[in-house]
Image: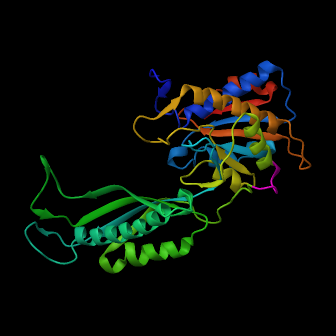
């Protein structure tokens, strides 16, 4: 922590901060003597950064999860640069795409058509133009980042290795590039894939492609209006803690919340971080001490409101968090020791 009170650490925004704020909020509620009407479960699971397939996805499909009778899930959000807290009711689908090009090898001094690099560069330029068109929509204002398709190159691989680097007088026979694409629920995914087949990786140019990850099918959204009582409870709880929420958004990346929405459970993405630039996966990630402590009080208010709510649905439980954890151990003894307190913290 520096002299300004800013805590610099990997995870200070994503997501060690939120995990600790959950625990501190629960501790404060217990110390105050608060008696919840609903059970509150804290879920810490692995692999969110690589898709969550061995973490939240399996958990959401398990009999254990079904037996918990969950009514609402709260997952991670994003920092807000303004006074208002950001809330997310859905998210973009991840398409992790690798495009491969093939062509005849040749001398580095020779000019000829349809080399692997030429074919790949044509595709990269086509993708760049599409990316620019989406970015222009965002720059024009009126829409949020989660409402456009983002395309960013993650790697570029080509060349013939040598002991000192690469062979400079040889044009390679293969080249490939990887892209992180995020697709909003409002976009026609079939039309985007046709663009991929016809323009970005046409077989006529000796191109092929594969998805390292691709979320397909219906994208589920959580109502963020008066039809959903959990939305009103969240808004009011934040106000009671001295804050306010901004217009609900589509999360620009991907979170574990999508698996719980798919299971039929409403889920919001929310991190109590305001007046802070978003630095997830960036250099110099930090969170102010005062903002961190204020966030604990916001969670106290939200947990208290959610855990006190009585509905006609018959579900009396909340799944709090679904935070991704790097730890694989189960801590079964710890789980058993706290189960009687209606708090479940699983570190998978």
Front position in the image: 101 or 78: 78
Residue drawn at 80 percent across, 53 percent down: 228
Q: Quadrant of the C terminus?
A: top right
Residue 328 visible, this angle? no
Horizontally, residue 42 falls left or right of residue 196, namely: right
Horizontally, residue 221 falls left or right of residue 129, namely: right
Q: How many marks?
A: 0
Residue 154 visible, this angle? yes
Front position in the image: 110 or 248: 248
Front position in the image: 98 or 134: 134
> Above or below — where is 164 with respect to 36?
below
| Image quadrant in which you'd find residue 97 | bottom left
Residue 236: % across, % down: 78, 42
| Image quadrant in which you'd find residue 308 | top right
Q: Determine the residue located farthest toward the right in the rendered image.
A: 312
Q: Main secondary structure of the magenta part?
A: loop
Residue drawn at 49 percent across, 62 percent down: 138
Q: Determine the residue located farthest toward the top in the rendered image.
A: 31
> Above or below — where is 181 with respect to 284?
below
Q: Tell whether position 228 is magenta.
A: yes
Q: Tell whether position 190 is magenta.
A: no
Q: Magenta part of the protein: which range?
A: 225-229
| Image quadrant in which you'd find residue 240 | top right
Residue 231: % across, % down: 76, 49
Horizontally, residue 87 falls left or right of residue 95, namely: right
Residue drawn at 41 percent across, 34 percent down: 284
Residue 202: % across, % down: 37, 77
Residue 265: % across, % down: 75, 51
Residue drawn at 69 percent across, 23 percent down: 334
């Amino acid at each position: 922590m520096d002299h300004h009170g800013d805590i610099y650490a990997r995870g200070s925004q994503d997501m060690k901060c939120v995990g600790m704020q959950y625990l501190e909020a629960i501790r404060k509620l217990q110390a105050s003597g608060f008696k919840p009407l609903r059970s509150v479960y804290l879920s810490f699971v692995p692999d969110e950064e690589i898709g969550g397939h061995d973490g939240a996805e399996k958990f959401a499909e398990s009999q254990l999860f079904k037996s918990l009778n969950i009514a609402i899930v709260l997952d991670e959000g994003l920092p807000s640069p303004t006074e208002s807290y950001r809330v997310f009711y859905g998210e973009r689908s991840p398409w992790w795409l690798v495009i491969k090009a093939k062509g005849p090898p040749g001398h580095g001094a020779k000019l000829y058509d349809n080399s692997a690099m030429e074919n790949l560069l044509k595709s990269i330029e086509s993708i760049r133009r599409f990316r620019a068109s989406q970015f222009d929509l965002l720059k024009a204002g009126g829409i949020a980042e989660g409402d456009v398709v983002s395309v960013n190159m993650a790697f570029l691989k080509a060349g013939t290795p040598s002991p000192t680097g690469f062979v400079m007088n040889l044009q390679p026979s293969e080249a490939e590039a990887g892209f992180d694409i995020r697709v909003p629920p409002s976009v026609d995914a079939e039309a985007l894939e046709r663009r991929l087949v016809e323009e970005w990786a046409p077989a006529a140019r000796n191109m092929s492609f594969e998805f390292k990850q691709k979320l397909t099918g219906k994208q589920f959204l959580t109502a963020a209006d008066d039809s959903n009582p959990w939305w009103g409870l969240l808004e009011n709880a934040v106000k009671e803690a001295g804050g306010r929420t901004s217009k609900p958004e589509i999360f620009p990346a991907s979170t574990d919340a999508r698996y719980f929405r798919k299971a039929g459970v409403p889920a919001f993405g929310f991190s109590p971080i305001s007046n802070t630039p978003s630095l997830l996966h960036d250099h110099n990630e930090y969170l102010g001490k005062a903002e961190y402590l204020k966030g604990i009080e916001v969670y106290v208010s939200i947990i208290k409101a959610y855990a006190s709510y009585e509905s006609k649905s018959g579900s009396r439980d909340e799944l709090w968090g679904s935070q991704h954890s790097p730890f694989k151990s189960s801590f079964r003894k710890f789980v058993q020791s706290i189960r009687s307190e209606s708090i479940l913290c699983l570190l998978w």
